[in-house]
Amino acid sequence: MKKFIQTFRNIWSIEELRSKILFTLLLILIYRIGTHVVLPGIDPAGLDLNAGQGGMLGMIDMFAGGAFSQASIFALGIMPYISASIFMQLMTVLVPQFQKMQKEGDSGRKKINQWTRYLTVLVTFVQASAYVAYLRQMTQQGGMIESFTPYFWLTSVIVLTAGTMFVMWMGEKITDKGLGNGTSLIIMIGIIARLPQTFVQEFVAKSTRTGMILVFIIEIAILLAIIMGCIMLIQGVRKIPVNYAKQIVGNRQFTGARQFLPIKVNSAGVMPIIFAQAIMFLPTMFSLTGTETGQGIAAVFSDHKNLWYMGVYAAVVIGFTFLYTALIFNPKQISDNLKQNNGFIPGVKPGQPTTDYIGVIMDKVTLPGAILLAFIGILPGIAERLGVTQGFSTFFGGTSLLIMVGVVLDTLQQVETQLMMRQYDGLMKSGRIQGRQTVTQTSV
């Protein structure tokens, strides 16, 4: 406890770190206030807050910290920017022109970021138009001010677009002048904002029944164990030894170094779960056909605790994990980089044999990572089947838990880096904290 207090004193004594923390907290506070500011023309008393709690709409509401269901000016949150960023990331892999732009260094990254912002405006405009149409269904009688109806579409689209761009700006400012990755922090804060309410609901549900307090304590213990498992999944790597030959530069000779090429167990991160949730939302469209079969299919894919849903969902997550890993991880490029830097894997010939060797290792590491990721993805459904309330079960796995664990690790890693730079002790005695960005590929 004494070391814990001393660590906080060290953190607060560093002026730069203290200013970063205060700046980050200020922007987060502004964001949370904005999530409760309702759009012009909406009567908050007439909102149906229980609408859109499942499927893709529920995921958007989770990322927006409840602003989506409250018809807030930040209702779309940071999701349009994330969608644009994912699209641009895929373009840098699939389109040679964007690949060339990415290799131009800072100037290329600035161009890609600018294109991402332009695309964010376009995506936000389209999503805002769809959201305005959705609001007319979500609002109950008297939920919309009739005198404002003629101007509602135009003003709402403008305000929602401006709100998303402001949230994007805050995320970039947190990244530049604050602590941690701004976009990830904003998403995490939106997720955590739901935790106290769901925690209380679960406690009340268990406390009203005799002997269920013990069950609630067991649930908390299991949740902590799952969080520890997520940390192991995020930090887990397979290290491939790499030797570098001796080099002669001028009149000096540099001895060869022995390093490691880290292959992450979960290179794809949380993206397979996000893609899988989007795909699993599509079958719910069969309910629009009006047929009994279509409504039955939609009912299955709308129920997260349904066994068929969990089976298909796990298979989709595993498939997307391999697909996304193949897109972002290029063994050929890594092999070429090693060859250019006089590096080689012991016992493996340079060139194509090295490429094949790295590819085989990647496949072997990705398989257990994909299975564990799929298991984490279906954990909320399993928890709900075992009696956990729907809101609290979302924190037992899935997107929300992975994002929270990953962002916390990244933030703690940055704090520890600031401490180590000033010759303070780190946050842990056993070793340095490894976030998602600590272990990177050689080509990045």
Image (cartoon, helix red, strand yellow):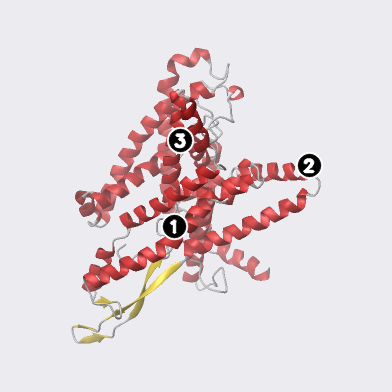
Mark 2 closeness class: few <14, some 14–19, many ≥20 residues within 10 Å? few
Residue 181 on image: x %, y %: 44, 53
> Toward the viewer: 392 or 378?
378
Q: Amino acid at mark 2?
A: Thr
**Disc 2 vs disc 3: Cβ atoms closer than 8 Å?**
no
Q: Looking at the rendering, in which quadrant would you find the N terminus?
A: bottom right
Q: Quadrant of residue 84?
A: top left
- In the rendered image of this protein, does residue 429 appear above or below residue 126? below
Q: Which residue is mark 3?
A: 76
Which of label 3 and label 1 is nearer to you?
Answer: 1
Mark 2 or mark 3: whose residue is earlier in sequence:
3
Position of 426 compared to 116: left or right? right
* CA distance separating discs 2 and 1: 39 Å
Q: Which residue is mark 1?
A: 370
Q: Is residue 174 visible?
A: no
Residue 32 on image: x %, y %: 55, 40
Mark 1 closeness class: few <14, some 14–19, many ≥20 residues within 10 Å? many
Kindly give the residue lying farthest to the top in the view shown. 147
Residue displayed at 60% across by 63% down? 8
**Disc 2 vs disc 1: Cβ atoms closer than 8 Å?**
no
Residue displayed at 40% across by 56% down? 268
Q: Is residue 171 visible?
A: yes
Q: Which residue is mark 2?
A: 208
Position of 202 compared to 358: left or right? right
> Toward the viewer: 309 or 358?
309
Mark 3 or mark 1: whose residue is earlier in sequence:
3
